[in-house]
Amino acid sequence: MKVFRSELQVGLKKKLFEIPSKSMEQDSIRFYENSIKCSISSEKSPHGYYLRGELNIPFLEQCDRCLADFKTEHNVDFSILFTDKKELVTDEEFDVVYFTKQQDNIDIAPVLMEYMTLDRSLKKLCRNDCKGICPSCGCNFNEENCNCMNDKADPSWDSLNKLN
């Protein structure tokens, strides 16, 4: 997604962008809609331009317990500083972007991808009370019960059972 210098100079006021989801898919990041909505405002600062906005992200996730796909929507606030001052740009700061006076536009997709990646949950659950799957037959306990005889305990846990 490119932002043009001419837009930054005039100033953006909650301008709505639709980013194609396909352009932001990566490894395990999937989406259930064709676009990601992004609202952006900008203002001039002594160091360059500040860009502030919000991403509305329609994630398609896979539950860590039952392996079923589920939809979740995240709203992520972000702020980015575009600057031509090299001393402000470091490898640790992904939200400070070097933007020379000769550049006409800048691609902010990599920065937005960082915000999306950081906002994703570490533990992805389709619901808080997800029951998971049967370790023997793979049956999703949220949808049905199985008749597996899962009484075979792993003998390596026997010493822990004696602690009760």
Image: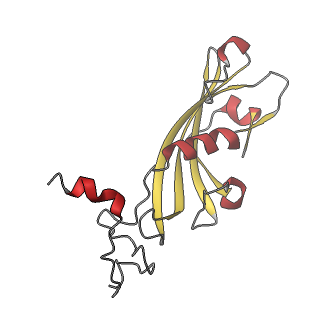
Residue at (57% x, 67% y) in the render: 32
Q: Please state the total of marks drawn on the protein image.
A: 0
Q: Find residue 152 and report its horizontal and vertical position in percent.
A: 33, 74
Residue 146: image quadrant is bottom left
User: Relative to residue 40, is residue 84 depicted above or below?
Assistant: above
The quarter of the displayed image where residue 149 is located: bottom left
Q: Which residue is drawn at 45% across and 78% down?
A: 138
Residue drawn at the location 34% of the way across and 63% of the way down? 155
Q: Which residue is drawn at 53% across and 60% down?
A: 59
Most distant residue in the left direction: 164
Pick out the residue farthest to the bottom. Answer: 147
Residue 113: percent from the left, percent from the top?
A: 63, 45
Rendered position, 42 above or below 155: above
Q: In this view, does 155 lie to the left or right of 1?
A: left
The residue most toward the top is 87
Residue 136 shows in the view: yes
Q: Nearer the viewer, residue 21 or 37?
A: 21
Residue 14 appears in view: no
Q: Quadrant of the C terminus?
A: bottom left
x and y percentages locating residue 151 in the rendered image: 30, 76
| Residue 90 placement (x, y as % from top left) | 66, 19
Query: In the depicted view, which residue is nearer to us: 142 or 25?
Result: 142
| Image quadrant assignment for residue 85 | top right
User: From the viewer's perspective, is residue 153 above or below residue 11?
Assistant: below
Name the one closer to the observer, 30 or 28.
28
Tell me: residue 130, above or below residue 17: below
- Horizontally, residue 146 falls left or right of residue 136, namely left
Q: How is the image coloured?
A: secondary structure
141 relative position to 68: left or right: left
